[in-house]
């Protein structure tokens, strides 16, 4: 899909929306941080809506694509957010969601060595920003299905896509290949992130 209307929920400092705008997309963005919203306006000329998606009135506007890059885990009500996203998408519209993986093996090992407690390994996430919800591939798939989406593609092994340096890229590639192989053999994601592309197909199952 090229061009069309795109909503990026939680655009941060605007790297993605800037690329999308430069490639012909009609871009709308939301961002909780006032500093980041002002920065994107100044740097890229994109007027970012400051606030949570649940508090924004988009009127009758609908979008071809909605993206949520590592924001769903910071929301206190992901179900409500996805129901709003479902409403905002055009029929057959595309949703892209990326979240940290709850079963990221390296982080789990780090947490266990730090606490010596098996259960706390699944709670600590090593992020400076709090993760209010933790997702596995299966829990994210179920949440999307319950809110009216059909899974189109699932990606694991997407760590370090923009890293610089030969050694860093090589390390990332080796880890990503290992992650993909484990997923193909066991359907378990041990990698850093989960990314799902999903299409709006029905009404939400949950009222």
Image (cartoon, grey):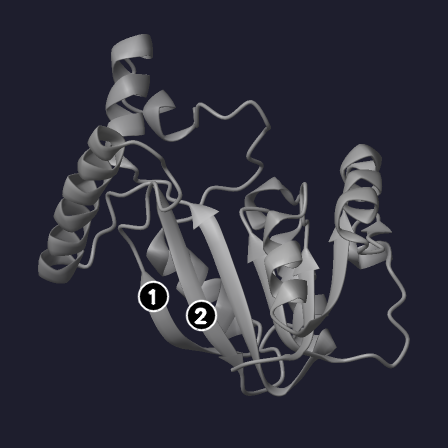
Q: Are marks 1 and 2 in contact (CB under 8 Å)?
A: yes
SS at mark 1 in the image: strand
Q: Quadrant of residue 6?
A: bottom right
- Of the image marks 1 and 2, the number of the one nearer the N terminus: 1
Q: Position of residue 128 (x, y in %)?
A: 56, 22
Instruction: Please rate how many residues cluster around mark 1, counting C-alpha atoms within 10 Å: few if below 14, some from 14 to 19, many from 20.
Output: some
Instruction: Let me know if residue 153 appears in the view.
Output: yes
Q: Using the image as rendered, state which of residue 183 and residue 147 is in the foreground.
A: 183
Residue that label 2 marks: 197
Left or right of 155, for residue 23: right
Marks counted in the figure total 2
Name the image quarter holding the C terminus.
bottom right
| Image mark for residue 184 | none
The residue depicted at 57 percent of the width and 72 percent of the height is 147
| Image side of residue 2 versus residue 87, left or right | left
Above or below 205: residue 99: above
In this picture, is 49 found above or below 76? below
In which quadrant of the rendered view does residue 191 lie?
top left
Q: Residue 154: give its label.
A: 1
Determine the residue positioned at 37% across, 40% down: 102
Eyeballing the image, is 203 above or below 83?
A: below
Q: Residue at x 86, y 59 (%)?
A: 56
Q: Is residue 205 above or below residue 165?
A: below
- Separation of residues labelled 1 and 2 (CA atoms): 7 Å
Q: Position of residue 186 (x, y in %)?
A: 13, 56
Q: Secondary structure at mark 2?
A: strand
Examine the rendering and report whether any part of residue 32 can be seen: no
Residue 36 placement, left or right of 114: right
């Amino acid at each position: 899909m090229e061009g069309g209307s795109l909503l990026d929920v939680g655009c941060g400092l605007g790297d993605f929306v800037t690329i999308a705008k430069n490639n012909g997309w009609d871009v709308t963005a939301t961002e909780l941080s006032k500093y980041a919203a002002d920065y994107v306006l100044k740097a890229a000329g994109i007027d970012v809506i400051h606030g949570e998606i649940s508090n924004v009135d988009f009127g009758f506007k609908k979008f071809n694509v909605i993206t949520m890059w590592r924001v769903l885990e910071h929301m206190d009500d992901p179900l409500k957010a996805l129901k709003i996203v479902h409403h905002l998408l055009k029929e057959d519209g595309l949703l892209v969601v990326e979240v940290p993986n709850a079963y990221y093996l390296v982080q789990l090992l780090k947490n266990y060595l730090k606490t010596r407690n098996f259960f706390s390994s699944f709670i600590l996430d090593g992020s400076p920003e709090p993760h209010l919800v933790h997702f596995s591939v299966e829990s994210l798939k179920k949440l999307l299905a319950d809110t009216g989406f059909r899974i189109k593609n699932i990606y694991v092994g997407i760590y370090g896509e923009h890293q610089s340096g030969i050694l860093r890229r090589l390390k990332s590639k080796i880890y990503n290949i290992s992650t993909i192989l484990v997923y193909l053999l066991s359907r378990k994601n041990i990698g850093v992130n989960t990314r799902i592309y999903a299409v709006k197909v029905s009404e939400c199952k949950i009222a």
